[in-house]
Image: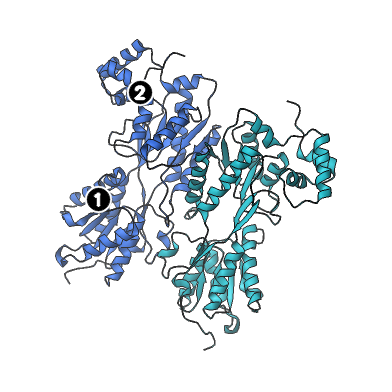
Chain colours: A cyan, B blue
């Protein structure tokens, strides 16, 4: 087989980015007709064959899909891991595919080496990615090599690679609307650091819902920290010490663990979580229903996502075409429990 | 290659069970010298080559280990899954191995078909098993084929296949001793159905600890049911309705979920869990520390088990000999929290 032409070489020839080349190859609508023609001309001139097609024509397909994920910290369990994995295994098995799982490495060079090794050794035909950061080196590496993958999660440009994501922004919008309907307006957000893509997507829903309700968000009301119990507790304690006129009477947290910390901080301030101060979480962890009060939270339709990602990925591998929709946003479900069932808490009375 | 001789054929020739043949091949000490000689004679006569040796001599090793597990019910998260998987992935990667994960099927024929397919297609070199039932068809199938595997869990005869297990009996013994030290003697057990191997191993520790303390176990005090919140709640409610003289003042549950149900039942009876009635769980789920009161529970050293299982399995695959110890029991850790911190509850006062 001749030396493979890379996406970067095509891109240089066509004077576009390799992401654009990837889009054209993946039949995305997000590229102008003029650019598309230029890329196709470069592809033809350089005799390029997309990698997945080359692979599918070979007899030696591994029928194996690679997947890794970021481990939970000790003392926490990943609430969706089991369901996500099992749904993918089942969907893959129906088509004679299996999942090969490999370790997560925080060190990016090491992680890229694993991806490279799995591709070069022919162990996998494609990947599922669920860790997708801004300017993600793994995403960039796979795009550049033209190696097939789907994302549970998307970047700002959701047309870069096929993906399904939970609409975290819509989720926070639903949580805020629900709290507003309970008569609370001073709502604070327990958010994540600015470099968290998922965190920012969720937070945008809080901001939109508050703006749509005509409520000014005070800068103090958005607290960013890593999503631990301790940080949720600390941020909430600080906010409950604000002067009465601007003190929040409700907290929307980007994950359940911060919400649990918030409820404990509220109780320590002599207030009743769920009655005096409302709290919502995100993830609907198994812990949520057993708390006192039980926690209102947002649940992700994990099985549906895992199954659909694998089904579409296999169609892509077998046909060379990813089925529509290329990018899909799925709404989470608001599970209402005692932590938002309370009566209005009037801080001025 | 000539038609492979099976373990069953060797066993028939030597007039022993195929489990005994498997033990001899695996260099277990648990077989008499006379039997060992007879099996070796049959092996020689029939020109048998153990499968793993045959495989390791072939150039085409997959360097892949297969693993499946029983999915958690909805609304529960498997508290040890992430840690167990990640520890195995890391240990495997160090030796250039990966894990291939496949779906769990409750229907045994279907599950055996998957094992068969994975072996016959050469996709895996060995398995890790963590679902090990009495007279387990998958265990029997792998023993019969002489295909390498290790168990997270063991059968009554722990010499049948290499394994590591948490000493659940010791764990319940520790829980009972701890409760006795708090001055409670009327201790009930929230146990699992009789066909649960893990459940019976744990329950045996409760029985031993009570007997060693000279306390007669009333038949009412052992309640068997599936390990759900609802069953824990129901069993506890029933036991708290017993006449005062035999009413338990402490509950040891075989898992956290039943313990949570027990605590809620205790509170509903107007009693304070952790003060009037003590409760212990098993698993130390992430929920345990966030409960009111927080739950005393038994934690399994999951990372150590996953890592060691894979390390030993790979030595076995590379050398044909499983390193000592062939079977290992690891003690769990008792994590003491508020649910057993209370003062003695005198039911006769």
- A343 over A129 or under it: above or below: below
Picture coordinates of residue A31, whole percent (x, y) = 78, 51
Point out the tag, 2 or 1, that comes first from the N-terminus.
2
Q: Is residue A214 left or right of residue B142?
A: right
Q: For mark 2, does the 10 Å Cα neighbourhood hold few (<14), some (14 to 19), or many (20 or more) residues?
A: some
Picture coordinates of residue B295, whole percent (x, y) = 36, 60
Q: For mark 1, does the 10 Å Cα neighbourhood hold few (<14), some (14 to 19), or many (20 or more) residues?
A: many
- Which residue is label 2 attached to? B27
Q: Are marks 2 and 1 on the same chain?
A: yes
> Which quadrant of the rendered structure holds the C terminus of chain B?
bottom left
Q: Is residue B346 visible?
A: yes
Instruction: State yes or no: discs 2 and 1 in contact (Cβ < 8 Å).
Output: no
Picture coordinates of residue A196, whole percent (x, y) = 64, 58
Q: CA distance from mark 2 to mark 1?
A: 34 Å
Q: Is residue A138 left or right of residue A230?
A: right
Picture coordinates of residue B24, whole percent (x, y) = 33, 22
Q: Is residue B169 left or right of residue B114?
A: left
Q: Foreground residue, B183 or A110?
A: A110
- B173 over A329 or under it: above or below: above
- A282 over B283 or under it: above or below: below
User: In what element is the residue under mark 1?
Assistant: helix
User: Label 2 marks which chain's residue?
Assistant: B
Rendered residue at 32%/46% (across/down): B168
Q: Foreground residue, A95 or B335?
A: A95
User: Label 1 marks which chain's residue?
Assistant: B
The image quadrant of residue B113 is top left
On residue B206, which mark appears? 1
């Amino acid at each position: 087989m001749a030396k493979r032409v890379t996406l970067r070489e095509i891109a240089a020839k066509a004077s576009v980015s390799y992401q654009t080349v990837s889009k054209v190859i993946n039949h995305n609508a997000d590229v102008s007709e003029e650019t598309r023609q230029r890329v196709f001309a470069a592809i033809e001139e350089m005799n390029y064959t997309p990698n997945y097609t080359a692979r599918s024509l070979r007899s030696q397909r591994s029928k194996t899909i690679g997947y890794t994920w970021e481990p939970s910290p000790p003392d926490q369990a990943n609430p969706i891991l089991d369901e996500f994995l099992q749904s993918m295994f089942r969907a893959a098995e129906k088509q004679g595919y299996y999942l090969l799982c490999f370790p997560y490495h925080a060190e990016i060079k090491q992680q890229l080496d694993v991806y490279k090794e799995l591709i070069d050794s022919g162990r996998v035909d494609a990947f599922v990615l669920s860790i997708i950061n801004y300017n993600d080196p793994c995403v960039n590496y796979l795009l550049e090599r033209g190696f097939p993958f789907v994302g549970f999660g998307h970047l700002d440009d959701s047309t870069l690679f096929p993906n399904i994501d939970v609409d975290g922004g819509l989720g926070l919008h639903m949580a805020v609307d629900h709290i507003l309907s309970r008569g609370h307006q001073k709502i604070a957000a327990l958010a994540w650091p600015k470099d968290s893509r998922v965190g920012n997507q969720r937070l945008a829903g809080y901001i939109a819902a508050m703006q749509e309700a005509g409520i000014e968000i005070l800068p103090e009301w958005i607290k960013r920290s890593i999503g631990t119990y301790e940080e949720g507790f600390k941020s909430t304690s600080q906010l409950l010490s604000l002067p009465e006129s601007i003190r929040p009477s409700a907290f929307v947290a980007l994950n359940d663990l911060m919400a649990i910390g918030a409820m404990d901080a509220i109780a320590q301030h002599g207030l009743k979580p769920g009655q005096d101060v409302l709290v919502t979480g995100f993830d609907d962890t198994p812990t949520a229903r057993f708390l006192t009060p039980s926690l209102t939270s947002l649940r992700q339709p994990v099985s549906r996502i895992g199954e659909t990602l694998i089904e579409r990925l296999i169609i892509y591998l077998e046909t060379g075409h990813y089925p529509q929709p290329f990018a899909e946003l799925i709404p989470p479900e608001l599970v209402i429990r005692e932590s938002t069932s309370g009566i209005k808490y009037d801080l001025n009375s």
